[in-house]
Image (cartoon, rainbow, N blue to C red):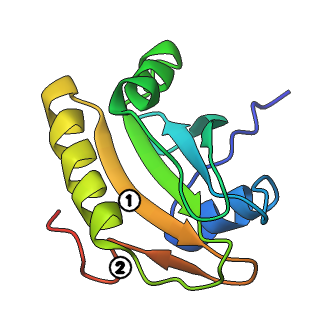
Amino acid sequence: MKDERIKIVSSSWAHHVLKKNMCQDVEELWCLALGPSLDLIAIQMIFRGTVDACLVHPRDIFRFACLQNASQLIIAHNHPSGDLTPSKQDIEFTHRMIKLGQMMEILVLDHLILTKKHYLSLVESGLLDL
């Protein structure tokens, strides 16, 4: 029997996988742990916050990645307000995560913001220098 792994080959596919899991009432931060061929190793909610905030610490994200033996990550969080606009903190946090990932040799491929119906990829929107 062939091993059927899910490959995350685009931000729309990552959104498809994530939208089934995220709560829409409070902010949550989720991570997709990926192997070198973009195979999905694991998906996990790292933090759950309030209706408009989610305190996040990088060590918990990278602990998850290391425990899963991931070589790549996609980070995602939702905006229960329905507004896809990334905050200044969202962009700064993502830049910090990319730098930390480079130091640890775990690539942070993207950061998605999700609402009930739509998503925004920070990479595809040109908000990150990758």
**Depth order, front residue of 41/93:** 93
| Local SS, label 1 | strand
Q: Is residue 109 left or right of residue 31?
A: left
Mark 2 secondary-structure assignment: loop
Task: Give the answer, above or below, for where 17 lies relative to 16.
Answer: above
Q: Which residue is farthest right?
A: 1
Circle on res. 110: 1
Task: Tell me if mark 2 has few (under 14), some (14-19) or many (20+) residues whose alpha carbon lies within 10 angstroms of its own.
Answer: few
Q: Is residue 121 above or below residue 107?
A: below
The quadrant of the rendering that contains the N terminus is top right
**Residue at left offset 29%, top offset 55%:** 94
Up-down relation of residue 129 to residue 116 (above or below) = above
Q: Is residue 13 left or right of residue 100?
A: right
In the image, what residue occupies the spot 55% across and 43% down?
Answer: 32
- Disc 1 residue crowd, few under 14, some 14–19, many 20+, Cα 10 Å: many
Q: Are marks 1 and 2 in contact (CB under 8 Å)?
A: yes
Q: Farthest residue to the top: give it.
A: 67
Amino acid under disc 2: Glu
**Residue position marked by numbered label 2 in the rendering:** 124
The quadrant of the image that shows the C terminus is: bottom left
Q: Residue at x 14, y 67 (%)?
A: 129
Residue 82 drawn above or below residue 69: below
Q: Residue 48: where, in percent of width, then height?
A: 65, 43
Q: Position of residue 87 (x, y in %)?
A: 36, 73
Residue 55: image tag: none
Separation (CA) of disc 1 from disc 2: 9 Å
Q: Report whether 55 appears left or right of 20.
A: left
Camera-side residue of 83 and 70: 83
Residue at 82% x, 59% y is: 20
Task: Look at label 1 and name its amino acid.
Answer: Asp
